[in-house]
Image (tube, rainbow, N blue to C red):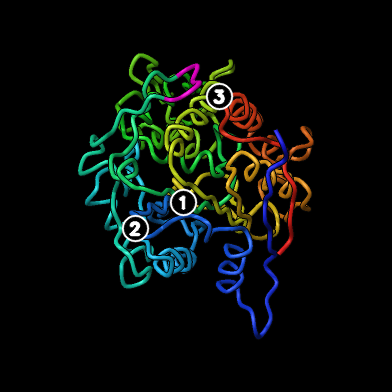
Amino acid sequence: MNPSPVYFTDMHTTGEMNLLQKLDRLMKKSGFDTIDFDKKYTAIKLHFGEPGNLAFLRPNYAKVVADYVKRLGGKPFVTDCATLYVGGRKNALDHLDSAYANGYNPFQTGVHTIIADGLKGTDETLVKVDGAEYITQAKIGTAIMDADVIISLTHFKGHELAGFGGALKNLGMGSGSRAGKMEMHSAGKPYVEQMLCIGCAKCANNCAHDAIQITDRKAFIDHDICVGCGRCIGVCPVDAVKPGRDEANDILNFKIAEYTKAVVQGRPNFHISLVVDVSPFCDCHSENDIPIVPDVGMYASFDPVALDRACADAVNRQPTIAGSLLQKHGHEHGDHFTDVSPETNWISALEHGQKIGLGTMDYTLIEV
Protein backbone atom coordinates (compact mmCIF):
# COMPACT_ATOMS: atom_id res chain seq x y z
CA MET A 1 0.00 0.00 0.00
CA ASN A 2 1.35 3.43 -0.95
CA PRO A 3 1.86 6.07 1.75
CA SER A 4 -1.23 8.17 2.40
CA PRO A 5 -0.98 11.95 2.10
CA VAL A 6 -1.51 13.81 5.37
CA TYR A 7 -1.84 17.58 5.14
CA PHE A 8 -0.58 19.88 7.88
CA THR A 9 -0.65 23.53 8.86
CA ASP A 10 0.88 25.05 11.99
CA MET A 11 -0.78 27.40 14.46
CA HIS A 12 1.07 30.55 13.42
CA THR A 13 -1.13 33.36 12.13
CA THR A 14 -0.81 36.69 10.34
CA GLY A 15 -3.00 39.75 9.96
CA GLU A 16 -4.31 38.23 6.73
CA MET A 17 -4.72 34.61 7.88
CA ASN A 18 -6.24 33.58 11.23
CA LEU A 19 -6.64 30.01 12.53
CA LEU A 20 -10.15 29.55 11.15
CA GLN A 21 -9.02 30.68 7.72
CA LYS A 22 -6.06 28.30 7.96
CA LEU A 23 -8.42 25.39 8.67
CA ASP A 24 -10.52 26.33 5.64
CA ARG A 25 -7.40 26.49 3.48
CA LEU A 26 -6.17 23.15 4.85
CA MET A 27 -9.41 21.47 3.78
CA LYS A 28 -9.19 23.02 0.31
CA LYS A 29 -5.60 21.93 -0.21
CA SER A 30 -6.26 18.38 1.02
CA GLY A 31 -9.03 17.64 -1.47
CA PHE A 32 -12.07 18.03 0.77
CA ASP A 33 -14.07 19.42 -2.16
CA THR A 34 -13.57 16.26 -4.22
CA ILE A 35 -16.29 14.62 -2.11
CA ASP A 36 -19.79 14.82 -3.58
CA PHE A 37 -21.73 16.67 -0.89
CA ASP A 38 -24.65 17.77 -3.07
CA LYS A 39 -27.84 17.27 -1.02
CA LYS A 40 -25.97 14.70 1.09
CA TYR A 41 -26.57 14.37 4.83
CA THR A 42 -23.14 14.90 6.36
CA ALA A 43 -22.30 13.84 9.92
CA ILE A 44 -19.52 15.88 11.52
CA LYS A 45 -18.49 13.54 14.33
CA LEU A 46 -16.78 15.24 17.25
CA HIS A 47 -16.65 15.42 21.05
CA PHE A 48 -18.76 18.17 22.65
CA GLY A 49 -16.75 18.06 25.89
CA GLU A 50 -17.86 16.95 29.33
CA PRO A 51 -19.09 19.90 31.44
CA GLY A 52 -16.16 21.24 33.47
CA ASN A 53 -13.60 20.23 30.84
CA LEU A 54 -12.14 23.15 28.87
CA ALA A 55 -9.73 21.30 26.57
CA PHE A 56 -12.38 20.32 24.01
CA LEU A 57 -12.32 21.93 20.56
CA ARG A 58 -13.92 25.33 20.29
CA PRO A 59 -17.14 25.16 18.23
CA ASN A 60 -15.68 27.80 15.90
CA TYR A 61 -13.71 25.03 14.19
CA ALA A 62 -16.86 22.96 13.65
CA LYS A 63 -18.53 25.98 12.04
CA VAL A 64 -15.70 26.25 9.51
CA VAL A 65 -16.20 22.60 8.52
CA ALA A 66 -20.00 22.90 8.43
CA ASP A 67 -19.88 26.11 6.37
CA TYR A 68 -17.61 24.46 3.80
CA VAL A 69 -19.96 21.48 3.52
CA LYS A 70 -22.88 23.85 2.99
CA ARG A 71 -20.96 25.76 0.29
CA LEU A 72 -20.55 22.41 -1.49
CA GLY A 73 -24.29 21.74 -1.31
CA GLY A 74 -24.35 19.37 1.65
CA LYS A 75 -26.63 19.13 4.68
CA PRO A 76 -24.27 18.97 7.67
CA PHE A 77 -24.96 18.35 11.35
CA VAL A 78 -22.68 17.90 14.36
CA THR A 79 -23.10 14.69 16.31
CA ASP A 80 -21.92 12.38 19.07
CA CYS A 81 -23.30 9.42 21.07
CA ALA A 82 -24.10 8.84 24.73
CA THR A 83 -21.54 7.86 27.34
CA LEU A 84 -21.39 4.82 29.61
CA TYR A 85 -20.51 6.70 32.78
CA VAL A 86 -22.43 9.15 34.90
CA GLY A 87 -22.04 12.77 33.90
CA GLY A 88 -23.42 15.40 31.59
CA ARG A 89 -23.73 13.27 28.43
CA LYS A 90 -25.39 10.02 29.55
CA ASN A 91 -28.74 10.69 27.82
CA ALA A 92 -29.72 12.86 24.89
CA LEU A 93 -31.34 15.64 26.94
CA ASP A 94 -28.37 16.09 29.28
CA HIS A 95 -26.03 15.66 26.33
CA LEU A 96 -27.73 18.47 24.41
CA ASP A 97 -27.61 20.70 27.48
CA SER A 98 -23.88 20.03 27.74
CA ALA A 99 -23.27 20.55 24.04
CA TYR A 100 -25.19 23.82 23.98
CA ALA A 101 -23.39 25.08 27.09
CA ASN A 102 -20.06 24.39 25.39
CA GLY A 103 -21.11 26.26 22.26
CA TYR A 104 -22.27 23.38 20.08
CA ASN A 105 -25.62 24.95 19.29
CA PRO A 106 -27.11 26.23 16.02
CA PHE A 107 -26.39 29.85 16.93
CA GLN A 108 -22.66 29.13 17.13
CA THR A 109 -22.09 26.36 14.56
CA GLY A 110 -24.88 27.23 12.11
CA VAL A 111 -26.09 23.61 12.07
CA HIS A 112 -28.17 21.31 14.23
CA THR A 113 -26.76 19.16 17.00
CA ILE A 114 -27.98 15.55 16.91
CA ILE A 115 -27.33 12.88 19.53
CA ALA A 116 -26.87 9.94 17.20
CA ASP A 117 -28.00 7.07 19.44
CA GLY A 118 -31.23 8.62 20.66
CA LEU A 119 -32.75 9.53 23.98
CA LYS A 120 -31.27 6.71 26.06
CA GLY A 121 -28.32 5.59 23.95
CA THR A 122 -30.20 2.64 22.52
CA ASP A 123 -30.93 3.80 18.95
CA GLU A 124 -28.38 1.76 17.05
CA THR A 125 -27.71 0.24 13.65
CA LEU A 126 -25.98 -3.14 13.44
CA VAL A 127 -23.10 -3.08 10.95
CA LYS A 128 -21.12 -6.07 9.71
CA VAL A 129 -17.44 -5.13 9.62
CA ASP A 130 -15.38 -6.36 6.68
CA GLY A 131 -12.30 -8.23 7.90
CA ALA A 132 -13.17 -7.93 11.59
CA GLU A 133 -11.64 -10.39 14.05
CA TYR A 134 -13.32 -9.29 17.31
CA ILE A 135 -16.64 -7.73 16.33
CA THR A 136 -19.45 -9.65 14.68
CA GLN A 137 -21.73 -6.65 14.25
CA ALA A 138 -20.79 -3.16 15.37
CA LYS A 139 -23.53 -1.23 17.18
CA ILE A 140 -23.40 2.32 15.77
CA GLY A 141 -25.59 5.30 16.61
CA THR A 142 -28.36 5.35 14.00
CA ALA A 143 -28.05 8.99 12.94
CA ILE A 144 -24.36 8.46 12.15
CA MET A 145 -25.12 5.44 9.98
CA ASP A 146 -28.00 7.28 8.28
CA ALA A 147 -25.63 9.98 7.04
CA ASP A 148 -24.35 9.86 3.46
CA VAL A 149 -20.92 11.31 4.34
CA ILE A 150 -18.91 11.07 7.57
CA ILE A 151 -16.41 13.74 8.64
CA SER A 152 -14.38 13.35 11.83
CA LEU A 153 -13.24 16.51 13.60
CA THR A 154 -10.98 15.40 16.43
CA HIS A 155 -9.25 16.98 19.40
CA PHE A 156 -6.02 14.99 19.58
CA LYS A 157 -5.11 14.29 23.23
CA GLY A 158 -4.02 11.58 25.64
CA HIS A 159 -6.22 8.76 26.89
CA GLU A 160 -5.86 6.57 29.97
CA LEU A 161 -6.83 3.31 28.21
CA ALA A 162 -6.24 3.80 24.49
CA GLY A 163 -3.01 5.80 24.86
CA PHE A 164 -4.34 8.74 22.89
CA GLY A 165 -7.64 9.92 21.54
CA GLY A 166 -7.40 10.54 17.81
CA ALA A 167 -9.52 9.95 14.72
CA LEU A 168 -10.02 6.24 15.47
CA LYS A 169 -11.07 6.89 19.05
CA ASN A 170 -13.41 9.70 17.97
CA LEU A 171 -15.03 7.59 15.25
CA GLY A 172 -14.86 4.09 16.73
CA MET A 173 -15.60 4.50 20.41
CA GLY A 174 -17.44 7.79 19.93
CA SER A 175 -19.89 6.44 17.35
CA GLY A 176 -20.79 3.34 19.34
CA SER A 177 -24.20 3.18 21.00
CA ARG A 178 -24.27 2.42 24.72
CA ALA A 179 -24.23 -1.31 23.93
CA GLY A 180 -21.44 -0.74 21.44
CA LYS A 181 -19.31 1.06 23.99
CA MET A 182 -19.91 -1.75 26.47
CA GLU A 183 -18.81 -4.26 23.84
CA MET A 184 -15.59 -2.38 23.16
CA HIS A 185 -14.78 -1.88 26.84
CA SER A 186 -15.67 -5.35 28.04
CA ALA A 187 -12.18 -6.81 27.70
CA GLY A 188 -10.46 -4.11 29.72
CA LYS A 189 -11.43 -3.99 33.40
CA PRO A 190 -9.54 -1.97 36.00
CA TYR A 191 -8.62 -3.01 39.53
CA VAL A 192 -7.86 -1.15 42.76
CA GLU A 193 -4.38 -1.23 44.26
CA GLN A 194 -5.49 -1.59 47.87
CA MET A 195 -2.36 -0.14 49.49
CA LEU A 196 -2.90 3.16 47.66
CA CYS A 197 -6.69 3.43 48.06
CA ILE A 198 -7.85 6.07 50.58
CA GLY A 199 -11.55 5.14 50.46
CA CYS A 200 -12.70 8.53 49.17
CA ALA A 201 -15.45 6.84 47.05
CA LYS A 202 -14.90 9.10 44.02
CA CYS A 203 -14.60 5.99 41.86
CA ALA A 204 -17.86 4.55 43.22
CA ASN A 205 -19.71 7.84 42.80
CA ASN A 206 -18.66 7.99 39.15
CA CYS A 207 -19.54 4.37 38.30
CA ALA A 208 -22.77 4.22 36.31
CA HIS A 209 -23.15 0.48 36.90
CA ASP A 210 -22.67 0.18 40.69
CA ALA A 211 -19.67 -2.06 40.14
CA ILE A 212 -17.57 -0.44 42.89
CA GLN A 213 -18.13 -0.97 46.59
CA ILE A 214 -16.33 0.64 49.54
CA THR A 215 -15.56 -1.77 52.41
CA ASP A 216 -13.35 -0.86 55.36
CA ARG A 217 -12.40 2.37 53.54
CA LYS A 218 -11.12 0.46 50.52
CA ALA A 219 -12.68 0.29 47.05
CA PHE A 220 -13.32 -3.00 45.30
CA ILE A 221 -14.41 -3.44 41.66
CA ASP A 222 -16.76 -6.33 40.86
CA HIS A 223 -15.64 -7.50 37.41
CA ASP A 224 -18.90 -9.36 36.91
CA ILE A 225 -20.65 -5.97 36.80
CA CYS A 226 -17.87 -3.66 35.56
CA VAL A 227 -18.00 -2.79 31.85
CA GLY A 228 -14.42 -1.53 31.81
CA CYS A 229 -15.16 2.07 30.78
CA GLY A 230 -12.14 3.36 32.72
CA ARG A 231 -13.88 6.36 34.25
CA CYS A 232 -12.71 5.31 37.74
CA ILE A 233 -9.09 5.46 36.59
CA GLY A 234 -9.32 9.13 35.78
CA VAL A 235 -11.19 10.27 38.89
CA CYS A 236 -8.98 8.55 41.47
CA PRO A 237 -6.98 11.29 43.25
CA VAL A 238 -4.16 8.94 44.30
CA ASP A 239 -3.85 6.78 41.15
CA ALA A 240 -5.00 3.68 43.03
CA VAL A 241 -7.24 2.45 40.20
CA LYS A 242 -5.20 0.70 37.52
CA PRO A 243 -5.98 -0.86 34.14
CA GLY A 244 -5.90 -4.65 34.03
CA ARG A 245 -2.39 -5.94 33.48
CA ASP A 246 -3.07 -8.16 30.48
CA GLU A 247 -3.84 -7.73 26.78
CA ALA A 248 -7.14 -6.03 27.56
CA ASN A 249 -6.13 -2.57 26.40
CA ASP A 250 -4.84 -3.97 23.12
CA ILE A 251 -8.18 -5.72 22.59
CA LEU A 252 -9.95 -2.46 23.33
CA ASN A 253 -7.86 -0.77 20.65
CA PHE A 254 -8.51 -3.60 18.17
CA LYS A 255 -12.23 -3.19 18.70
CA ILE A 256 -11.98 0.60 18.31
CA ALA A 257 -10.29 0.08 14.94
CA GLU A 258 -13.03 -2.35 13.85
CA TYR A 259 -15.79 0.02 14.99
CA THR A 260 -14.08 2.82 13.05
CA LYS A 261 -14.16 0.69 9.92
CA ALA A 262 -17.86 0.03 10.50
CA VAL A 263 -18.47 3.79 10.49
CA VAL A 264 -16.48 4.69 7.36
CA GLN A 265 -16.73 1.65 5.08
CA GLY A 266 -18.78 2.07 1.93
CA ARG A 267 -19.24 5.83 2.00
CA PRO A 268 -17.18 9.02 1.57
CA ASN A 269 -15.21 10.00 4.66
CA PHE A 270 -12.66 12.64 5.62
CA HIS A 271 -10.70 13.30 8.80
CA ILE A 272 -9.37 16.39 10.56
CA SER A 273 -7.37 16.41 13.79
CA LEU A 274 -6.28 19.44 15.79
CA VAL A 275 -3.21 18.84 17.92
CA VAL A 276 -3.88 21.65 20.40
CA ASP A 277 -4.41 21.68 24.16
CA VAL A 278 -2.99 18.15 24.30
CA SER A 279 -4.40 17.21 27.69
CA PRO A 280 -3.12 13.97 29.25
CA PHE A 281 -6.59 12.41 29.48
CA CYS A 282 -9.82 12.29 27.50
CA ASP A 283 -12.28 15.18 27.09
CA CYS A 284 -14.79 12.84 28.78
CA HIS A 285 -13.35 13.98 32.11
CA SER A 286 -15.16 16.80 33.88
CA GLU A 287 -11.78 18.49 34.30
CA ASN A 288 -8.61 18.84 32.28
CA ASP A 289 -4.99 19.13 33.30
CA ILE A 290 -2.52 21.46 31.60
CA PRO A 291 -1.28 20.29 28.18
CA ILE A 292 1.66 17.90 28.11
CA VAL A 293 3.25 19.48 24.99
CA PRO A 294 2.93 22.80 23.12
CA ASP A 295 0.27 23.22 20.44
CA VAL A 296 1.41 21.69 17.15
CA GLY A 297 -1.12 22.34 14.39
CA MET A 298 -3.97 21.01 12.27
CA TYR A 299 -3.87 17.81 10.22
CA ALA A 300 -6.20 16.42 7.54
CA SER A 301 -6.39 13.23 5.49
CA PHE A 302 -8.72 10.77 3.81
CA ASP A 303 -6.90 8.04 5.79
CA PRO A 304 -7.68 7.98 9.55
CA VAL A 305 -4.86 5.53 10.34
CA ALA A 306 -2.22 7.66 8.63
CA LEU A 307 -3.66 10.76 10.28
CA ASP A 308 -3.42 9.28 13.78
CA ARG A 309 0.14 8.10 13.15
CA ALA A 310 1.21 11.52 11.86
CA CYS A 311 -0.31 13.26 14.87
CA ALA A 312 1.26 10.83 17.35
CA ASP A 313 4.67 11.25 15.71
CA ALA A 314 4.28 15.03 15.87
CA VAL A 315 3.42 14.97 19.58
CA ASN A 316 6.38 12.73 20.35
CA ARG A 317 8.71 15.23 18.67
CA GLN A 318 7.58 18.02 20.99
CA PRO A 319 9.27 19.18 24.20
CA THR A 320 7.57 18.57 27.52
CA ILE A 321 5.66 21.45 29.10
CA ALA A 322 7.08 22.28 32.52
CA GLY A 323 4.76 21.28 35.35
CA SER A 324 2.69 18.90 33.23
CA LEU A 325 1.89 15.29 34.09
CA LEU A 326 4.32 14.26 31.37
CA GLN A 327 7.15 15.99 33.21
CA LYS A 328 5.95 14.51 36.50
CA HIS A 329 5.90 10.96 35.09
CA GLY A 330 9.28 11.30 33.36
CA HIS A 331 10.48 9.73 30.13
CA GLU A 332 11.10 6.13 31.06
CA HIS A 333 9.26 4.77 28.00
CA GLY A 334 10.50 7.18 25.33
CA ASP A 335 6.94 7.87 24.17
CA HIS A 336 4.90 10.76 25.56
CA PHE A 337 1.59 8.90 25.70
CA THR A 338 3.07 5.77 27.25
CA ASP A 339 4.98 7.93 29.74
CA VAL A 340 1.70 9.48 30.92
CA SER A 341 -0.30 6.20 30.88
CA PRO A 342 2.25 3.35 31.08
CA GLU A 343 -0.28 0.52 30.74
CA THR A 344 -1.40 1.68 27.29
CA ASN A 345 -0.20 0.68 23.82
CA TRP A 346 -1.62 3.17 21.33
CA ILE A 347 0.04 1.72 18.26
CA SER A 348 -1.99 -1.49 18.55
CA ALA A 349 -5.09 0.29 17.22
CA LEU A 350 -3.19 1.57 14.19
CA GLU A 351 -1.56 -1.79 13.51
CA HIS A 352 -4.93 -3.50 13.62
CA GLY A 353 -6.53 -0.79 11.51
CA GLN A 354 -3.87 -1.35 8.86
CA LYS A 355 -4.36 -5.13 9.09
CA ILE A 356 -8.12 -4.94 8.43
CA GLY A 357 -7.78 -2.48 5.56
CA LEU A 358 -8.88 0.69 7.34
CA GLY A 359 -5.75 2.58 6.24
CA THR A 360 -1.98 2.59 6.43
CA MET A 361 0.53 3.82 9.00
CA ASP A 362 2.80 4.97 6.14
CA TYR A 363 2.21 8.61 5.30
CA THR A 364 3.63 11.53 3.39
CA LEU A 365 3.36 14.83 5.26
CA ILE A 366 2.42 17.79 3.06
CA GLU A 367 2.71 21.21 4.68
CA VAL A 368 0.14 23.78 3.63
Amino acid type, residue under disc 1 in the picture: Ile
Q: Is residue 18 left or right of residue 262?
A: right
Vertical placement of 139 versus 107: above or below? Answer: above
Q: Toward the viewer: 52 or 28?
A: 28
Magenta stretch holds residue 46: no
User: Which residue position holds label 2?
Assistant: 77
Residue farthest to the bottom?
15
Name the residue tied to disc 1.
Answer: 151
Q: What residue type is labelled 3?
A: Asn
Query: Gap in Å between the C-alphas at discs 1 and 3?
Result: 26 Å
Is residue 191 shown to the viewer in this render?
A: no
Q: Name the residue under label 3.
A: 249
* CB contact under 8 Å: marks 1 and 2: no
User: From the viewer's perspective, is 224 left or right of 260?
Assistant: left
Depth order, front residue of 165/255:
255
Eyeballing the image, is 84 above or below 155? Answer: above
